[in-house]
């Protein structure tokens, strides 16, 4: 089967604008594929280039070398079949929640009435039925994330890219959101590439967890299939014996990289 | 009684008006011949000669608007010049600001020239504009334009530069084309900067119009002031200044009310209410 998203030998080297001699290779020779309907998480120590990989998959960043294929087609420019949930605030502050949700539909030229109908429906689905006329600054952090989720999913993308979307949320809100995302994903079965630094989150949600090495020049060093039964509840699955086993195995690989990354950052500082 | 007079949020307007009245009363007392003995001047008429008398100033304004009714033509010309300079300057500043912010290469090439043009004392251009565009409205609009343009331009430039990269990337991922990015992301994002510049530039549009009239014209409030100065009629000069100030305030208020409507998405602190 053609993978929904495949990265082949991706290398990203950044050149400093001020000092053209200074180069930084964030990721080197990364090959990664996500099958249609598969939920893949990428974990790795902080600063290892996880977001770089996601930006490459989204088409926001051109890799220095390597190729990206989307459903078999080589990617040029923005990945139009993908929806992207950003780590930081990405809502347009001058638009209400509803207007934010339907922004993508407007860009695609969907008639206003139809766009509004879909937008309202999605707001309800993420539990923000009565909040359509609020501006982002009037919403809590969790509500803004839900709005972002609705904004991404209303376009019904075939691939969903998520960059630590819940890292700014408190643990309770976070587990709620994780369950909501799993539920929505189970209903539609889209390919998901999920970036996180939280191993618990990665195991609880994914079909497969890929571990990246510490940067610079990070690359996958381990891949684990998560065979926990679905549907899962992210809070409950954490105490399952199989979860703990997997966690131990993956952490065994990850721990060294985390320490290595920490050492490197300490030396650089 | 005293409780109600204590300055607070509720009687703000009352106190604002009070300050105005107090200024005029002090002005009146100090300038009215014969009211206070001359301390600084040689005789009691000189204060009135140098500073004007509020009552005569108001009589002059009354005369302009309701007595002889001869100010309307002049006021119309000045307001037209101001509004034209303001509108053209704002639109041009917006367009050029957007363009340069979005094409870094053009901005890099033009950068020294824009800085040079901006730091040049542009009021000095007024006589040149009078030669180029004649003594009519056009030369005043041109002067006002040069003053308004740079303020709006720099603010738009800065505003577009400071668009959140995440919001921008998000809009691109949602499928916005280059034109849609301009219309739905850059423009709204720059509006708060634009409005802060508009408040400054309204005043400068007036400066452009009046200075232009002052340096050579046959109509306008600036022309009236110049005529009055020629005959040392300080009351008419003051009256002209007061009328201009009032209309500048009206224009500023108009900008402010548009701003409040367009910027209602901005967070304002202290939105809670004591129950």
Image: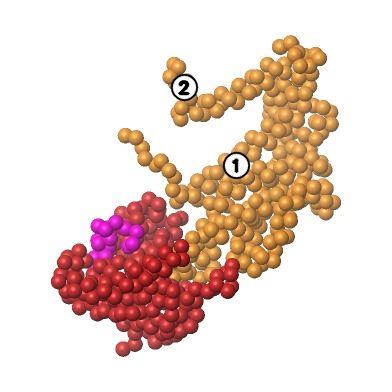
Chain colours: A red, B orange
- Is residue A101 positioned above or below A49 on the image? above
- Is residue B231 positioned above or below A113 on the image? above
- Residue B134's x, y, as percent? 83, 50
What crowding class fits label 2: few (fewer than 14 Cα within 10 Å), some (14-19), or many (20 or more)?
few
Say if the magenta span includes residue A170: yes
**In the image: residue B193, left or right of residue B44:** left
Task: Determine which of the numbered discs, if any, sits on residue A179 in the image.
Answer: none
Q: In front here: A172 or A250?
A: A250
Q: In front here: B17 or B137?
A: B17
Task: Determine which of the numbered discs, if any, sits on residue B6 in the image.
Answer: 2
- Residue B22's x, y, as percent? 60, 21
Please name the residue shown 23% across and 70% down the image: A204
Say if the magenta span includes residue B86: no
Please name the residue shown 30% across and 66% down the image: A198
Residue A202 quadrant: bottom left
Q: Which residue is mark 1?
A: B252
Residue B176 visible: yes
């Amino acid at each position: 089967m053609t993978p929904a998203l495949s990265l082949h030998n991706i290398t990203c080297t950044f050149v400093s604008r001020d000092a053209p001699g200074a180069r930084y290779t964030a990721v080197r020779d990364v090959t990664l594929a996500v099958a249609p309907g598969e939920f893949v998480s990428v974990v790795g120590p902080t600063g290892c280039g996880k977001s770089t990989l996601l930006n490459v998959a989204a088409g926001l960043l051109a890799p220095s070398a390597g190729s990206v294929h989307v459903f078999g087609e080589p990617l040029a420019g923005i990945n139009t079949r993908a929806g992207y949930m950003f780590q930081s605030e990405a809502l347009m502050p001058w638009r209400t929640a509803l207007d934010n949700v339907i922004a993508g539909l407007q860009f695609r030229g969907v008639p206003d009435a139809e766009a509004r109908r879909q937008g309202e429906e999605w707001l309800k689905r993420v539990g923000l039925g009565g909040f359509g006329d609020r501006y982002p600054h009037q919403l809590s952090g969790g509500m803004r994330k839900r709005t972002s989720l609705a904004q991404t999913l209303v376009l019904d993308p075939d691939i969903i890219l998520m960059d630590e979307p819940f890292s700014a949320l408190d643990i309770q809100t976070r587990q709620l959101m994780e369950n909501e995302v799993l539920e929505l994903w189970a209903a539609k079965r889209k390919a998901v590439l999920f970036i996180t630094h939280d191993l618990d989150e990665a195991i609880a949600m994914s079909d497969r967890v890929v571990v990246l090495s510490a940067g610079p020049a990070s690359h996958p060093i381990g891949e684990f299939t998560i065979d926990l039964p679905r549907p899962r509840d992210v809070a409950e699955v954490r105490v399952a014996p199989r979860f703990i086993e997997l966690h131990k195995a993956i952490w065994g690989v990850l721990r060294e990289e985390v320490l290595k990354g920490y050492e490197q950052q300490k030396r650089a500082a | 009684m005293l409780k109600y007079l204590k300055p607070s949020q509720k009687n703000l307007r009352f106190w604002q008006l009070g300050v105005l009245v107090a200024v005029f009363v002090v002005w009146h007392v100090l300038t009215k011949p014969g009211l206070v003995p001359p301390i600084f001047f040689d005789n009691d008429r000189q204060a009135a000669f140098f500073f004007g008398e509020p009552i005569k100033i108001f009589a002059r304004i009354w005369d302009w608007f309701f007595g002889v009714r001869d100010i309307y033509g002049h006021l119309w010309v000045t307001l037209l010049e101001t509004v034209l300079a303001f509108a053209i300057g704002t639109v041009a500043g917006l367009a050029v600001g957007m363009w340069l912010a979005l094409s870094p290469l053009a901005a890099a090439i033009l950068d020294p020239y824009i800085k040079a043009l901006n730091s040049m004392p542009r009021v000095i251009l007024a006589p040149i504009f009078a030669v180029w565009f004649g003594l009519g409205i056009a030369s005043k609009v041109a002067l006002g334009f040069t003053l308004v343009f740079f303020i709006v331009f720099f603010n738009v430039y800065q505003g577009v530069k400071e668009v959140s990269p995440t919001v921008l990337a998000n809009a691109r991922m949602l499928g916005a084309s280059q034109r849609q990015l301009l219309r739905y992301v850059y423009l709204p994002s720059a509006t708060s900067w634009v409005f802060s510049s508009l408040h400054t530039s309204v005043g400068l549009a007036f400066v452009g119009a009046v200075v232009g009239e002052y340096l050579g014209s046959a109509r306008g409030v600036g022309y009236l002031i110049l005529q009055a100065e020629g005959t040392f009629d300080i009351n008419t000069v003051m009256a002209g200044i007061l009328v201009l100030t009032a209309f500048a305030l009206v224009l500023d208020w108009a900008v402010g009310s548009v701003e409040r409507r367009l910027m209602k998405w901005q967070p304002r602190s202290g939105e809670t209410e004591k129950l």
